[in-house]
Amino acid sequence: MRARSAGRTSVGRWCLHHLELVPVIMLVGGAVFDYYTPPHVSGEALYTAAPMTAAALLSLRATILAGIGACAADIALLTHFGMIGDSGGWSELAAVVTVSALAIVVNRLMYYSYVRLQSARRVALAAQRAVLPQPPGSIGALQIAVRYQAAAKEAQIGGDLYGAQETPYGMRCLVADVRGKGLDAVKVVAVAMGAFREAAEEEPSLAGVAVRLERALLREKARRTGPERTEGFVTGVLVEIPYGDDEVRLVNRGHPAPLLLHAGRIQSVDPAEPALPLGLAEPDGEPDRIDTVPFPMGATLLLYTDGLYEARNRAGDFYDPAAGLTGVAFTGPDALLDILLTEVNHHTEGRIADDMALLAVTRTPSVPADEPGGG
């Protein structure tokens, strides 16, 4: 069974890498079949399909050539069998010519659809860059890398978000996941990112940033109707790394625990106390518990959304990022995220079912003389 599956996979890969040969194979195969069979058995279906196949896979020029080839093959075979002058022969030739002409029309329609799709993707990518701008590659002694992989690749953006910025209080970042899908989730992403950027600059405490986010999301939820007004929420982790300190501070609001990688060890940074997701708590209630963990030189903090550990293989097994990264060597946060995405795609065979946002921060051994925020 595995050998058959591998064989089918090899054939499929060969076809994908030699698409231009598929119409030729159909055209030649149909003509040969027609030539070596009795006159009443026709291979018209095969070489008629050649221009349609070219229309779907190849360029306008290739489609026209396939159509000319199909018409020429049909004329040659009808002449060979002495059927070029009778009504059946003319009817068959008319069918081949009609299908070839339709193939050209289909090719043009598909081309214009492709152009519109590419335009929509560029708009989606611009929207993603506006809502989720690329953070700086480094802030002082911190190297930063982010990745975003949407489940629907044509969408480019979904309900996951990340942010990292330099502030007077240290480098602050956010990774969060909005409940829900579609445009409503994107709207919440925009609200959360706007609130985070402003609060991260102004609030002296990480708990204060969480309060500002809570208020912004509650205002957004109040404008909604239906189940989203009562059930909408955002899970997230807020992180603060003070300049020059060897510690990291976290506020976790119902989000997957970050991973701390250092000296070959992987530690799950679980919150000391569980907390409700953003958008479900009262902003004037008890302040959030701030967890503090050591963040020595060479350590990397990995934040991610649930699309990472909920990625499944064909057997239904979830991906375990801690197990997947155990014993893996990497040169920096960019390399780590590249390795991680490769592992996840290998685990799922490319079938990503949920959006995935990743953010990694590494504290480098070399510290610049003048760090951001220093006096």
Image: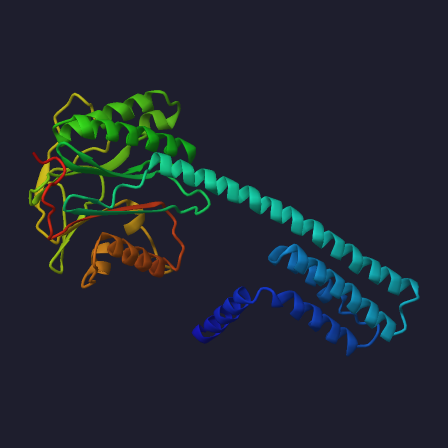
Q: Nearer the viewer, residue 279 or 50?
A: 50
Dividing the image into 4 quarters, which one contains the C terminus?
A: top left
Whether residue 279 can be seen here: no
Whether residue 7 is situated above or below residue 23 in the rendered picture: below
Whether residue 363 is situated above or below residue 85 in the rendered picture: above
Whether residue 144 can be seen here: yes
Q: Nearer the viewer, residue 136 or 258?
A: 136
Total marks in image? 0
Q: Residue furthest front?
A: 369
Whether residue 205 is situated above or below residue 148 in the rendered picture: above
The structure residue drawn at horizontal position 52% and vertical position 44%, both measured from the top left corner, is 118
Q: Residue furthest bottom?
A: 36
Would you say 155 lies left or right of 284 here? Answer: right
Dividing the image into 4 quarters, which one contains the N terminus?
A: bottom left
For the rendered model, the colour scheme is: rainbow
Whether residue 160 is situated above or below residue 94 in the rendered picture: above
Q: In the picture, residue 265 is in which quadrant?
A: bottom left
Residue 256 in the image: x percent, y percent?
Answer: 22, 44
The structure residue drawn at horizontal position 75% and vertical position 64%, both measured from the top left corner, is 70
Residue 135 in the image: x percent, y percent?
Answer: 27, 41
Residue 338 in the image: x percent, y percent?
Answer: 30, 56
Q: Nearer the viewer, residue 145 or 279?
A: 145
The structure residue drawn at horizontal position 85% and vertical position 70%, both measured from the top left corner, is 78
Would you say 323 lies left or right of 13 here? Answer: left
Q: Residue furthest right?
A: 86
Residue 313 in the image: x percent, y percent?
Answer: 35, 58
Would you say 251 lies left or right of 145 here? Answer: left
